[in-house]
Amino acid sequence: MGSFSLEKAKEILAKHTKESHLFVHAAAVSAAMEAMAEHYGADSEHWAAIGWLHDVDYEKFPDEHCHHVRELLEPEGISEEDICSIISHGYGVVTDEKEPQTDMEKSLFAVDELTGIVHAYALMRPEGMKGMEVKSLKKKFKDKRFAAKCDRDLIQQGVERLGLELSVVMECCIKGMQAHESELGFEKQ
C-alpha cells in the first residue's frame, strides 16, 4: 500500500487552500492523528498526512465538502483507499458515500471537531497548549457556549465508533497538538 508522506500532503493542500486558518486546522488534525496512530501502534506519518489533507476540497467547495476529494487527489497519485478514508470524515454530515470503518477513519471523524475545542481552549490560556489537562478540557467541552461551532454530538459519535473513552481521545489530541505547538501558532514557553 503506497502511503504518501506528510511533505506530499502539505504540497497538495497548498495547491488548493490559501486561508491561513485552514492550514492551522490541518496542522491540528494532523497532530492529533499522529498521536492517535501512536495510540493504535499504527503508521503515524501516514495518519498525520491523512489528517493534513482531510479538508483538501473545503476552501474551493465549502458547500460540497468531501464531494471533490477524489478529483483533487487522484491526479496526485493518492490511493483510492486513502481518498475513501478522507471522504469518510464527512459521513452523515456532508456525504453518505463512505462510513468510517478503520481505526484511522474513525479517529479522523472523532478528532476533526475535537481539535477545534482544544485549539480554542489553548488560545484563552496564557500558557497556550503547555500543561493542558484532560480534566479542564472536559469542563470546556461540557460548556456548550464555549467553541459553540464545534459539534459535540459528532465528537461523541466518533469516540463511540472508536470504542474509547472521550478522555483517551482528548489526551491524544492534547499530546499531539503539544508536540506541534509552533505550527499551531503557540510558541513553546
Image (cartoon, rainbow, N blue to C red):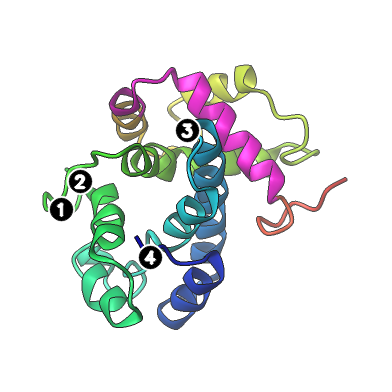
Label 3 or label 1, whichever lies nearer to me, is 3
On the image, numbered disc 3 is attached to which residue?
A: 40
Element marked by disc 3: helix
On the image, numbered disc 2 is attached to which residue?
A: 91
User: Distance of mark 2 from mark 1, alpha carbons?
Assistant: 5 Å
Q: Is residue 167 magenta?
A: yes
Q: Is residue 45 visible in this depiction of the protein?
A: yes
Query: Which badge, 3 or 1, is on the more N-terminal residue?
Result: 3
Pinpoint residue 84: horizontal percent, then vertical percent.
Answer: 23, 57
Q: Is residue 79 left or right of residue 25?
A: left
**Residue occupying the point 29% across, 67% down:** 79
**Residue occupying the point 35% across, 36% down:** 103
Label 3 or label 2, whichever lies nearer to me, is 3
Q: Looking at the rendering, which quadrant does residue 112 occupy? A: top left
User: Distance of mark 3 from mark 4, alpha carbons?
Assistant: 20 Å
Q: Which residues are magenta?
A: 159-180
User: Distance of mark 4 from mark 1, alpha carbons?
Assistant: 26 Å
Q: Is residue 68 magenta?
A: no
Neighbourhood count class around disc 3 (C-alpha, 10 Å): few under 14, some 14–19, many 20 upward: few
